[in-house]
Amino acid sequence: MINNQVEPHGLLAIALLLAMLVIGVYSDLRGHRIPNALTLPGLAAALSLQVTVGGLPGLVSGLLGAVIGLACFAPFYLLRGMGAGDVKLLAAVGAFLGPFGVLYAALISLLAGGAGAIGFVVWRALCASIRTIVHDGIGMSGAAAFVAARLARRERLPFALPIAIGGIAACWYLTDFSAGTAWLRGALT
């Protein structure tokens, strides 16, 4: 999104970005995988749109966004805290949003992922505690919650959802919808 006003090409970019994120979230939730068959065409579509709209500066913006997106999450992949599909998904998001947009998306994704991870651990501990209270009484509920929380910390969470939250929030933050709304009103009348 070279300029921040939504025009027909901007609406197409937003639609493609949203479609890629929805499919990525679905795939990650179902099978803990974000396939290359999604991220690579998403990257290619973003770069194509960037070139079409902005020429060489658009291509540079898209490539910088992809590289910065890759660089933001590569350390987490190298430390085995995140899958390669998550890293490539953020790179594709970066190609759509450009260098500044992907920084917003990465930051919001990390915040959303952290909140989701904390919520997941608390949920698992609460469920184990309640299950233990029902079956064994209140005395063992604390130990069950502790064990469940420790086990939940070891599970890999699908990170496509936080990336989608970050990508959509960054897109919303960077986009001026007034021009797109005016264009859509004119097209419908």
Image: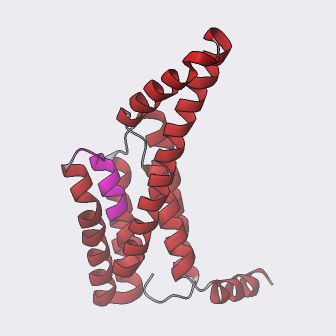
The quarter holding residue 158 reads top left
Task: Indicate whether 13 appears above or below 126.
Answer: below
Q: Of residues 19 and 169, which is closer to you in this image?
A: 169
Say left or right for 79 vs 100: left
Rendering coords of residue 120 (x, y %): 51, 40
The quarter holding residue 80 reads top left
Q: Of residues 138 and 16, which is closer to you in this image?
A: 138
**SS majority, magenta:** helix
Task: Indicate whether 189 appears above or below 84.
Answer: below
Rendering coords of residue 58 (x, y %): 34, 85
Which region of the structure is painted magenta?
80-91
Say left or right for 162 vs 132: left
Image point (64%, 83%), residue name: 177
Task: Indicate whether 162 appears above or below 30.
Answer: below
The reply to whether residue 16 is in sight is no
Rendering coords of residue 157 (x, y %): 42, 41
Does the magenta portion include 84? Answer: yes
Image point (24%, 50%), residue name: 77
Rendering coords of residue 106 (x, y %): 39, 66
The reply to whether residue 140 is in sight is yes
The residue lying furthest to the left in this view is: 78
In the rendered image, the quadrant that contains the C terminus is bottom right
The residue lying furthest to the top in this view is: 136
